[in-house]
Image (cartoon, grey):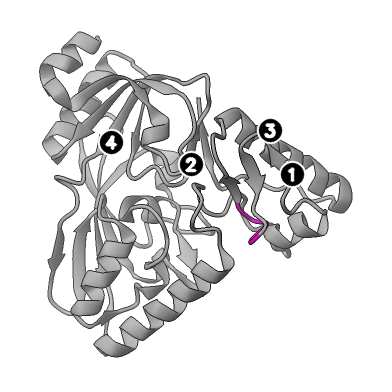
Amino acid sequence: MINKLKIMMGDKLTENADMSRYTSFRAGGCARALIEVATTEELKAVLQLVTEENIPHMVIGNGSNMLFKDSGYDGIVIKLSQQGFDYVNFGENNTVSAGTAVANGVLAKMLQREGLAGFEFASGIPGSLGGAVFMNAGAYGGEMKDIVKSVKTISPDGQEERIFTAEEMDFGYRHSCLEENGYIAVEVTMELEKGDREEIAARMKELMEKRNSKQPVNYPSAGSTFKRPEGYFAGKLIEDAGLKGLTVGGAQVSTLHSGFVINIGGATATDILQLMALVQNTVYDKFGVMLEPEVRIIG
């Protein structure tokens, strides 16, 4: 089976891929193989083969919201390459279509130069546009659902291209329909507003300074570790439970923002998962609230 994929993809396939190199936590085990695809045709072909052969597989972008267990993933990781999915095309009526491997920060700067407003909230969100759409990423009062017009996708079996409208995406808090239906976003069309370049730049600078002062951006993490529970803030619950600075191995509840579990050096995925469980159990015991991970755990 791997041989068939090797013949198809050549040096774009890496066996026993160390997933700590492909995820923002910089921790975790190996995947059976990782394949970088640069076109929708390559993506379709790989999906069709792994579906026919019934091989476990998953698609990733920048890996900024996931953690692979130390035991690894006995399947194929398909990565959308920045060589093929990082384009940005400007259309009429303030619309922009971009490949889903574009980094949010890079896209934000390009939009600012074009005088297009509405994406500033995402300028400091780590990761790619695809990840942001998949989980309806948001910050500082903005969410992807506010600006997405449509999403071009490939079906999980690689057989079909489908465009989802914003309504069909079923955006909710850190949620889209892609989580359930398995369709893979390859291009996002957004509808923005004409704005003043300097005002947009100032807003981005303000949000970046706010983020840098309040979040542990200098350490590997997956961003906010837990979803916001109804009626509460995860970070405040964790801090009120006396867990700020709590450490397991190389993993720590950030002393800057308790909503972040960070890798302070040499953390294993097991360290991170044990710390997350400790936080969940303590917060539940003290406040009766079960925190739900925002990080996707693989393996």
Q: Are marks 2 and 3 in contact (CB under 8 Å)?
A: no
- Residue 250: give x, y in percent of width and height: 61, 37
Q: CA distance from mark 1 to mark 3?
A: 9 Å
Q: Quadrant of residue 242?
A: bottom right
Front position in the image: 22 or 190: 22
Is 277 situated above or below 238? above
Q: Which residue is mark 1?
A: 279
Residue 34, labelled with which disc?
none
Q: CA distance from mark 3 to mark 4?
A: 28 Å
Taking the spot 32% from the left edge, 83% from the top edge, the residue there is 200
How dense is the environment of label 3, judged by Cα within 10 Å: few (below 14), some, or many (20 and up)?
some
Q: Nearer the viewer, residue 98 or 69?
A: 69
Q: Please tell me whether mark 2 sits on a helix, a strand or a loop.
A: loop
Label 2, on which residue?
25
- For the N terminus, which image quadrant? top left
In the figure, residue 37 lies in which quadrant?
Answer: top left
Residue type at numbered disc 1? Val
Give the residue pinned by disc 3: 274
| Residue span colored magenta | 256-260
Q: Which amino acid, by three-letter code, is at mark 2?
A: Phe
Secondary structure under tag 1 reads: helix
From where the camera sits, is residue 188 visible? yes
